[in-house]
Every structure is written in C-alpha cells, then in structure tokens.
Amino acid sequence: MSREYATNDWYPVADAARMIPGHGFTTRLLGEPLEVSGSFENPVVTARDGRMLPVQVRYGHVWTTTGSAPRPLFDIAEADETDRTFVPCGAVQVRCSPLRAVENFLDIAHFPFVHTGILGEEPHTQVAPYKVEIREDADEVWATQIGFHQPQAAKSATEAIETRYEYRVPAPTTAVLYKTCPPKPEAWDVIAIFVQPVAEDMCIAWPWMALYDDVSPYADLVQFQQEIFLQDRSILENQKPTLLPLDPRMEIPTRCDLTSVVYRRWLKRKGATYGALTTAA
Amino acid sequence: MTFTLYNYVLSGNCYKIRLMAALLGVEYETVAVDFYPGMEHRSPQMLSLNPAGTLPVLTAGDLVLTETQAMLTWMATSFDTSGTWFPAGDPALLGVVQQWLGFSGRLTQSAGLARLHSMLDWPVDGQAACAAAVKDLRILERHLTDRVLEGGLWIAGETPTIADVACFPYVALSPDAGLEHDAYPAIRNWLYAIRGLPGFVAMPGIHYRHEGTSGTNG
Ligand SMILES: N[C@@H](CCC(=O)N[C@@H](CS)C(=O)NCC(=O)O)C(=O)O
Ligand SMILES: [Fe+2]
C-alpha cells in the first residue's frame, strides 16, 4: 500500500448543502480522523494535529486533501450547466476497498443480475465490444462506444432503451459515467461516484448525479440511485480479497472486464495503491 | 386505488408493506419520501401526517396508519380472501401472531438500527444495536428451531402470517450490518421459504431466489 500517492488527491468529506453551522462532525480519511465544521460558504476541515486542511466546494460536496503537493481536482464540465438537476445522494458506508467501489461502478456485465429490471434484464446479458484507453494528456481512463439494453435506464425512462455509455476515471477514487438521457437523447445524463477512502478496507461512497429531468419528483431521483447503489453494497462487502489485486497473476479473468483491467494497470503504473493488493500472496 | 404508501426504498419497515401488498396481489400508489439524506420524514408536511416522524405512512381515504403492524393487520383483513394471513378465527394462533408482531417492533430497534448505523452512519450506538440484534436473532432462531421440530416452517401455524412478513425484513437485512446468517440455520431456511412465496418482491440487500440453488445464498 502507498498512502503517499493517495495523500495528494482531493476527497469528499461532506454534503455541502447539509452543513449546519455549530454542528461539526468527525470522519476519517486515509486512516486518520478529521473534524468537519463550518458552513456551506465557509467549510472548515481540521486534522488531528489541529492543522486546517485546504478545502473547496465542488459537485455538491466539500473536498479536502491532506498532502503537501495536491494534484488539482478533476473537472466535470456538466456541473456548470445550470439547467440540469443536481442530485447528491448522501453518504453510504461500505466495508470494502475504495478501489473496489470504483471498479464495481465501471462494470456493466453485472447489471442484469444485480440490478434486474432496472439497468439490465435477461436474456440481454451480452456486453458488445467497446473501447478502453488511458488518455495520456489528461491522465484518465476512458471507456467509450458502450451500448447496453436497459429496462429502466433512468427515472425519466418510459420504456426499455439501448443506452449509450461512456465511463471516465479522472482520479483513483472517482468514476464518472455519461449515459443516454431518455427525455433528451442528444444529451448525456452524468452520474458519478465520489469515494472517500476511510481506510484501505473501508470507504464512504457519495453518489452524485447531474440530470435532465423536469418531471420526476426529487425524492424519486434520489431513491432511484440509492436503490441501485445499495444493491451493489452487499456484493461489494462480500468480495474476496477485500483489497483490489493489481498483480496480473492474481486477476480472476471472468470478473475483470476490459475497463477493470485497464483501471488496474493505470493504478499500478501511477503507484496509486492505497486499497490495493500489490503482490501475489 | 386501494391505498397510498409514503415510501422510502431502503426502509425495511416500508418494505414490509410492499412485500405484503405483493404477496396479496394488491395494487397501490407510492409517494417517495426523501428519508436520507433529505430527512423529509421530519418535514412539517410529513409531521402533520405522522407526528411520530417515522415511515411508512399508509393512507386509504380518511384512514391514516403510521404503525407497520397496524398496516399489515388492515391489509390482511381487507384484501386476503383466504383468511390465513391474519387468523382472526383462532384465538390461540392469533395470540402467537400478535406476540411476534411485537417482536418485529423490537427488531426495528435492534437489527434495524444496527443496519442504519453501519450503512448510513446513523447517530446511534452501533455496538449496542448489534448486541441487541444478536440477542433477537438467537430468540428467533430458537423459536424457528422449535417450530421445525414440531413439523412447522412458519412463525405461527401451518401457513405464513403477517408475523412472518413483519419479522422478515430486518432479519434478512442483518448482513448489511455485518451480522451474517451462518450461525442461524433455522433462520436461513425460513428466509429461503419466504423468498419462495408466490408474488415475493425483493429490495436492495434481499434477493430473489434463483432456480436450482438452495439455502440463503440461492
Ligand atoms: N413504529 C413504527 C416504526 C417505524 C420506523 O422506525 N421507521 C423508521 C424507518 S424504517 C423511521 O422512520 N425512522 C425515523 C426515526 O426514527 O426518526 C412502525 O412500526 O411503523
Ligand atoms: Fe451495480
């Protein structure tokens, strides 16, 4: 494991809109306790030694970093499109490696079996070939040209559609997906999972969406995403080994689709191994 | 429409009502309530419907019910043509059903809270909730073991009742709090039997049974 690399990324620690002045709370990041307090306008994150950490409010969340030379927080351009509905879905604790949570989010093949009737259904289980690459200029993993049959692609979907997808990993603990927006097929709906690494084997997932949907009540949008994520949670908690194996000799090919192979390779190359298993046991 | 359910998809108590309706084949309407992270069950609008500030809430015309056990009783007596889900004609059996309905309320406070704590960091004493949940799981395991020795499968009597529906969710969901079912063979068989009932519906953390397998991992 390397905390070293991980300390210089930014992580979500709070839902910005739900910060209540005078009601600070403690959380954990990379194995260390943090105090989060202040307000939406002025959030304050304090380390155990009393040091005030850098903060920024982006994508509905309060982000912080503990390192001395933080890399910039990635950009999600759609976050600035004010005609979208932004839906932060709260925090869900999962007893798994933060990297496992990201990898699961990138996997399409499980849709018909885990998200039956929503994101997939039998017999439409085949994932057609798609493209995965490491975009060197941005230092991101991208999977594109993905199509999948979905009975209920979004709350806004009124019928089953062939959903187009693009996946993007802009940082080791964040995955962003772009999928066909049913009421506005020329646009993408954006769904992200921001993962707060609590420890190597424990994380907090902060799902977030930026949608075009003028019809669905807000509570329905939140629950649609929560239902899907909580279906994944019980599976994530039962994955073995708990840490994400990066040694190719340890990979179980059936579970690893192409995106996951490239994601693991990218992590290994960068030395982003917090939450990873780097040598065959 | 028969009734309206103020619903939260991850709530085990709301799921009791969804499951009962599915098993009885009753159609109903839902209103999504943003329980988490929105805390909408504590909004003025929801508090005027249910001053206790809990979910689920069931309305049917002028009727407003805020306790799950009352809802299950009302649903079974209104919609169950077989008369088996709420055995009103058999005092001893009905007594046992009521006994376990009471127990299901305890499960909300033990296994239910343990789950909310471990999943959503609910501000409760997680260790105390887990300890209480283990105690309740052992009580149910013992009861179901006795039932098997008597040749029974369900909590009370020869058929499933609202007591089975009321106790099912938080027992089935206890792995969400890290409380696995390995040590509870009678509970495992009972969960498996409920998942096989005609009309059964799943929720996140509780899966459909797959063909050709047995036990809770099916
Ligand atoms: N006695 C109620 C309890 C229901 C209950 O505890 N519901 C939970 C959700 S599953 C709740 O609303 N908790 C909110 C709170 O306690 O503030 C019933 O049986 O319906
Ligand atoms: Fe999933």
Image (tube, rainbow, N blue to C red):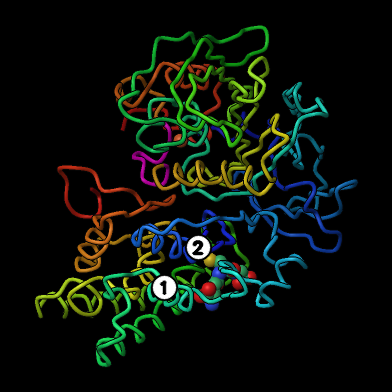
Q: What is the number of the mark on residue B78?
A: 1
Residue A189 placement: quadrant: top right
Q: Position of residue A139 (x, y in %)?
A: 63, 14
Q: Which residue is mark 2?
A: B2
> Residue visible at 15% across and 43% down?
B212
Dot 1 surroundings within 10 Å: few (below 14), some, or many (20 or more)? few
Question: Which chain letter goes with mark 2?
Answer: B
Q: Position of residue A212 (x, y in %)?
A: 70, 29
| Looking at the image, residue A267 lies above or below residue B109 | above
Span colored in magenta: A236-244
> Residue visible at 46% across and 74% down?
B110
> Residue visible at 60% across and 63% down?
B122
Q: Nearer the viewer, residue A65 or A137?
A: A137
CB at mark 2 closer than 8 A to ligand 1?
no
Label 2 SS? loop
Count of marks overlaid on the render: 2
| Looking at the image, residue A140 lies above or below residue A229 | above
Using residue A109 as the reference point, say whether residue A99 is left or right of it. right
| Looking at the image, residue A206 lies above or below residue A104 | below
> Residue visible at 43% across and 71% down?
B75
